[in-house]
Amino acid sequence: MKNLFSILFIAVFTIANAQESANRFFYELTFKPKKDSTKIDKVISILDITGKKSIYQDYTVPAQDSIIKIAVEEMEKTKSWKDMSKMIRMPKFSYKIIKTYPEMKQQYVDRISMNMFGYEDDIKFKWNILPEKEKVGEYNTQKATTEFGGRTWNAWFSTDIPFQDGPYKFYGLPGLIVKIEDTDKHYSWKLSGNKKIADYAELSYSEQINAKYGMSNTVTPTTKEKFEKAYATFKKDPMGEFRQRITPEMSSMKMPGSDITIGEMMKKQEKIAKDFFNSNDNPIEKTAQVSVGKLEKVGVEKNKK
């Protein structure tokens, strides 16, 4: 009996510890999407910190998981298609930044058509910590500056929060970055809240359902140069890979339970994608434009792995 209880205790302890927890930090990102416009946009982004890594991303889609779940379950039950573009908001940024602890190796991850690709981004920040202190929200912070991506950045970090991390690619100060902005104020992150997630799932519901229907979440490693060339091609023809799979006969077929054809649906999705790509010509990092390459280049790399 004693051995039975010991085995039971070990099993319960193992299951309990298998549930990963995370600290989620919410940042309000204020940014200028267009170089030649005075328009300022806002979005909530999140930094999820676990014991092994942190994940930074736009919170727009994960925040709508419950709405997406209800819509998908209804479609699966009725076997009919529903235009979800009328129900949910599109994210402003589609990528994720993953930093692995304790080395702080960074991986930039984004989707190109139906596949996920990621490249290593070796960034070493040279911070100049200043004596200037400031109260940011409820936190006592200290100022630091750095040069990155063709911009000068002012950051305020708090040693009250013992994570040497921050939003986007920023890290390396003796405390969490509570606020950071470039001197032109084109991009500014400010911590707006945080919470503890006891049973943390790295993938949102929408990402899980994408995988169920053929859009893999497995990240294929590539190089930054190859990724940027392939992404430039993808932006020019976002439905190219889908179009190769659709015959003229299929294009004229109607979506299940709908009056819209597959071809019309694809045109609508193409417009949504192009609107997304054209919404921002003022990137966080002022990098040189890459020449357009072929999407297959990344695909070939994938097959070699």
Image (tube, rainbow, N blue to C red):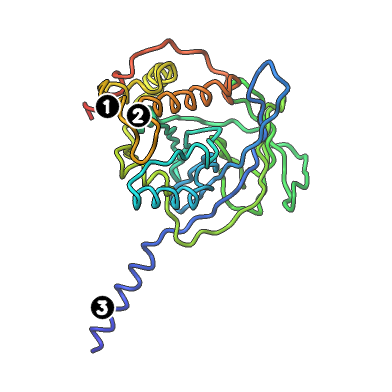
Of residues 82 and 297, the one drawn nearer to the viewer in this rendering: 82
Q: Secondary structure at mark 1?
A: helix
Q: Give how far apart the Cα atoms at labels 2 and 1 are.
A: 7 Å
Residue 200 position in % (x across, y down): 45, 56
Residue ranking furthest to the bottom: 1
Residue 250 circle label: 1
Q: Give how far apart the Cα atoms at labels 2 and 3 are.
A: 55 Å
Q: Is residue 121 left or right of residue 40?
A: left
Q: How many marks?
A: 3
Judging by the rendered image, the residue that carries numbered circle 2 is 262
Q: Is residue 284 above or below residue 208?
A: above
Residue 286 position in % (x across, y down): 58, 19
Q: Are marks 2 and 1 in contact (CB under 8 Å)?
A: yes
Residue at x 33%, y 37% (from the top left corner): 215
Q: Give how far apart the Cα atoms at labels 1 and 3 are.
A: 57 Å
Q: Secondary structure at mark 3?
A: helix
> Disc 2 marks which amino acid?
Ile
Q: Which numbered disc, 2 or 3, marks the residue that appears first in the sequence?
A: 3
Q: Are marks 2 and 3 in contact (CB under 8 Å)?
A: no
Q: Secondary structure at mark 2?
A: helix
Q: Is residue 258 left or right of residue 271?
A: left
Residue 7 circle label: 3
Q: Quadrant of the C terminus?
A: top left
Residue ranking furthest to the front: 259
